[in-house]
Image (cartoon, rainbow, N blue to C red):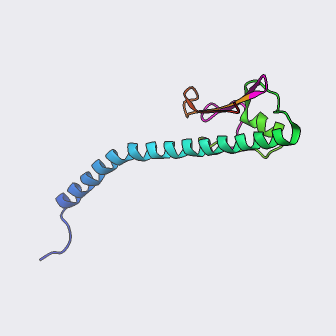
Amino acid sequence: MQKGFSLMELLVVMSIIGMLSAVMLPNLSGAQNRAKETALRALLYNMQAELEGYYLDNNYYPAGEAVSLAQLTALLGLKPCRNPFTGRDYQGGDTAGKVLYSLDNGDYTLTAYKKDGASVLLELTNN
């Protein structure tokens, strides 16, 4: 009597594993995207806290209209932030996970965009 698996048994097991992985991969990539969006939300709340601290120190918010996060961190004197979607420090031309800051009549708006660069993920204001 021989021990081991037949070729047919191995092929059946491999096909089952292949089907399971085909079903699971889209779910895993969706979970990664949601985790990156959560990290971006946290970053936006931290930037809001930094802006409020800046206001307490200076009695005004930094001026800017459609300023990128890279420019805002420089205005606030902070070290560069990492973009959760790219894994690099924010650049002015980032579209995935971009963050824009604008100040209008003393009221600021911080807007974070999703991976596509067009859909708004979160918008924070001081009013």
Which of the two residues, 2 or 37, is positioned nearer the viewer here?
A: 37
To which quarter of the image does residue 63 belong? top right
Instruction: Point out the image quarter for the C terminus.
Output: top right
* Residue drawn 29% across the image and 54% down it: 17
Say if the magenta span includes residue 70.
no
93 over 37 or under it: above or below: above
Residue at the farthest left position: 1
| Majority secondary structure of magenta residues | loop
Image x and y of residue 117, in percent: 58, 29
Magenta residues, start to end: 86-107
Instruction: Point out the image quarter for the N terminus.
Output: bottom left
Image x and y of residue 16, in percent: 25, 53
Image x and y of residue 85, in percent: 59, 41
Say if the magenta span includes residue 104.
yes
Residue at the farthest front position: 127
Q: Position of 44 compared to 72: left or right?
A: left
* Residue drawn 57% across the image and 26% down it: 118
Which of the two residues, 9 or 92, is positioned nearer the viewer here?
A: 92
Which of the two residues, 37 or 19, is positioned nearer the viewer here?
A: 37
- Number of numbered discs: 0
* Residue drawn 28% across the image and 48% down it: 19
Image x and y of residue 76, in percent: 82, 40
Q: Position of 4 compared to 62: left or right?
A: left
Which of the two residues, 88 or 47, is positioned nearer the viewer here?
A: 47
